Image (tube, rainbow, N blue to C red):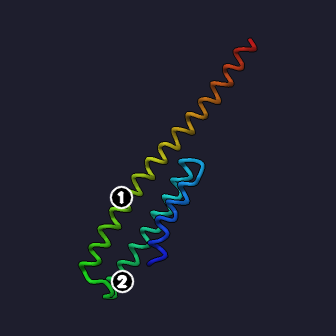
């Protein structure tokens, strides 16, 4: 469980160091996977009687909030990544048209 929990911020940190929003979003997806893995470990620990109901509920609520924040941030990064890709393609296309108009 500690490995899964530790993977969440580690993947966010690693993604922050990437060059594009799309790459960052990919690491946020990985962090979401680690959050789901953590949820599985929590459920298992609760089912085995290793976590009481109050502790399980507290951890589960916090994990749910973390997953919501990660999902929202991932969605924003994907949208930003798509718009910057479209913007870059438009700028390249505009530059080609300008170059072509100079020749005429």
Residue lying farthest top? 104
Q: Is residue 103 above or below residue 6?
A: above
Secondary structure type for disc 1: helix
Where does the image place residue 7, in percent across and percent down from the top left? 49, 69
Q: Determine crowd level at label 1: few under 14, some 14-19, many 20+ residues with C-alpha closer than 10 A.
A: few
Looking at the figure, which quarter contains the C terminus? top right
Q: CA distance from mark 1 to mark 2?
A: 22 Å
Figure check: 90 above or below 29: above
Residue identifier under label 2: 45
Say if mark 1 contacts mark 2, CB within 8 Å: no
Residue identified by numbered label 1: 68
Q: Secondary structure at mark 2?
A: helix
Residue 100 position (above or below residue 30): above
Q: Quadrant of residue 69?
A: bottom left
Identify the disc placed on residue 53.
none
Considering only order in the chain, which callout, 2 or 1, is on the residue closer to the N terminus? Answer: 2
**Residue 18 vs residue 53: left or right?**
right
Identify the image quadrant of residue 95.
Answer: top right
Q: Residue farthest to the bottom?
A: 49
- Residue at position x 61%, y 29% from top? 91
Residue 71 placement: quadrant: bottom left
Characterize the local packing of mark 2: few (<14), some (14-19) or many (20 or more) Cα atoms within 10 angstroms: some
Left/right placement of residue 60 relative to residue 78 reads left
Quadrant (top left, top right, bottom left, bottom right) of the N terminus: bottom left
In the rendered image, the residue lying farthest to the right is: 103
């Amino acid at each position: 469980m500690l490995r899964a929990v530790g993977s969440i911020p580690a993947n966010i940190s690693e993604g922050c160091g990437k060059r594009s929003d799309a790459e960052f979003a990919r690491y946020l997806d990985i962090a979401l996977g680690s959050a789901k893995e953590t949820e599985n470990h929590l459920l298992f620990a609760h089912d085995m009687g290793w976590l009481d109901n109050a502790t399980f509920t507290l951890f589960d609520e916090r994990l749910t909030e973390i997953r919501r924040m990660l999902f929202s941030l991932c969605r924003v990064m994907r949208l930003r990544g798509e718009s910057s890709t479209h913007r870059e393609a438009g700028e390249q296309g505009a530059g080609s048209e300008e170059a072509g108009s100079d020749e005429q």
